[in-house]
Image (cartoon, rainbow, N blue to C red):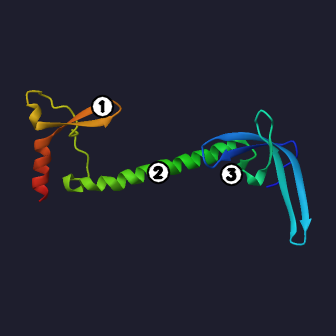
Amino acid sequence: MNFSVGQIIYLLTRKDPKVYPALVSEEINKRSLSGESTSYMVKLPTEDTKEIELNKLDAEVFISLDEARDKMIERATGQINLILEKAKSISSVFDEFITSKENSTQSPLDEPEGDNLSDAEYASVDLGNGKVGRIDVSSINKIKEMSQ
């Protein structure tokens, strides 16, 4: 990438999801027996406006915030997909309990209509975020018996 001295660029760090602006302060053109190269010095937004060689930073460089945003969304989507795929593969431990792939009209976690059954027939399940569900244990045993 080529930059102009005085141009503001945006650095998306590889380690943390942070974006920093940097000011291109110097363009260094080098010609040697092995060829020509161009490097850039940038000023970082620190108290002393420290200058550092751009290629020594562990960051991706963007010329606009929109480009940085697109890359961040791509990274986040990738992470979300990994999390969901992992959950999907872990869910295979429940394969023996599944009787059909179609959703039933009532979820096993729904509260029973009549609460006259004893708590011994139901198990409480922590769903996270302060939510607790109840599972009819006898229905799990029936499903298990049917699958054997």
For the residue labelled by badge 3, is the local secondary structure a helix, a strand or a loop?
loop
Which residue is found at the position 63% from the left and 46% from the top? 70
Q: Earlier in the sequence, mark 1 or mark 2?
A: 2
Q: In the rendered image of this protein, does residue 61 appear above or below residue 117?
A: below
For the residue labelled by badge 2, is the local secondary structure a helix, a strand or a loop?
helix
Q: Nearer the viewer, mark 1 or mark 2?
A: 1
Residue at the far front: name it: 48
Which residue is found at the position 58% from the left and 45% from the top? 73
The picture places residue 126, in percent across and down from the top left corner, at 27, 36
Judge whether residue 119 can be spotted in this image.
Answer: yes
- Label 3 close to label 1 by CB (< 8 Å): no
Q: Nearer the viewer, mark 3 or mark 1?
A: 3
Disc 1 from disc 2: Cα separation: 25 Å
Which residue is found at the position 86% from the left and 72% from the top? 34
| Label 1 CA crowd tier, 10 Å (few <14, some 14–19, many 20+) | few
Disc 3 from disc 2: Cα separation: 25 Å
Tell me the quarter of the picture where residue 132 sits: top left
Q: Amino acid at mark 1?
A: Lys
Q: Which residue in the structure is indicated by mark 1?
A: 131
Tell me the quarter of the picture where residue 47 sits: top right
Give me the disc on residue 81.
Answer: 2
| Label 2 CA crowd tier, 10 Å (few <14, some 14–19, many 20+) | few
Give me the disc on residue 112.
Answer: none
Q: Nearer the viewer, residue 64 or 86?
A: 86
Q: Which residue in the structure is indicated by mark 3?
A: 58
Q: Earlier in the sequence, mark 3 or mark 2?
A: 3
The picture places residue 28, in percent across and down from the top left corner, at 89, 55
